[in-house]
Image (cartoon, rainbow, N blue to C red):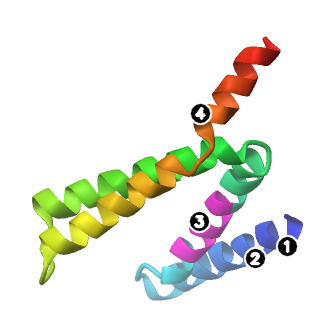
Amino acid sequence: MYYLILLGLVFLLGGIVINIETGETSPYIYFGIGTLVATAIYYGIVEKRPQIAAFIIGLIVMHSGILLIIKGELTYPIEFGMVTFISGILVLLNSGFSEYMRDRKKNS
């Protein structure tokens, strides 16, 4: 965890230094922020409750598929959107969220 935080800070600070020197937005800023956010999400949610994280990821993938179907600007937006939508449904069904909720209800 500490290595990922350090890596994110290195990218973020490197991007800020490049931004100050050149005046242009550096992709290193996005790498740093993305690494820090991914570390916080993983060690905050995924490690403790993987079912909830898989459920959230499934919802994101499913809704991305819906957006591709409705507003896609790719070569084959409907086909790609359908594949993404179905992938999201499969992730939702395999997330184990219902078993997590059932076990949580038994424990209360």
Residue 34 covered by magenta stretch: yes
Question: Which label was assigned to residue 33?
Answer: 3
- Above or below — where is 62 with respect to 72? above
Distance between the alpha carbons at the discs numbered 4 and 3: 32 Å
Residue at image mark 2: 7
- Expressed as whole percent of the image width and height from the top left, the position of residue 72 reads 15, 68
User: Which secondary structure lies at badge 2?
Assistant: helix
Residue sitting at 20 percent across and 64 percent down?
68
- Which of these two is toward me, 73 or 34? 73
Q: Residues within 10 Å of mark 4 (few under 14, many from 20)?
A: some
Query: Is residue 1 covered in magenta?
Result: no
Q: How far is disc 2 from disc 4 in space, using C-alphas? A: 36 Å
Label 4: which residue? Answer: 98
Which of the 4 image quarters holds residue 14? bottom right
Per the model, the C-alpha gap separating discs 2 and 3 is 10 Å
Mark 4 and mark 3 lie on one chain; the one further toward the N terminus is 3
Amino acid on which the number 4 mark rests in the picture: Ser
Mark pair 2, 1: CA separation: 6 Å
Residue 4 left/right relative to 15: right
Residue in front for this viewpoint, 46 or 30: 46
Name the side, left or right, on which 56 lies relative to 44: left
* 61 sits left or right of 4 in the view: left
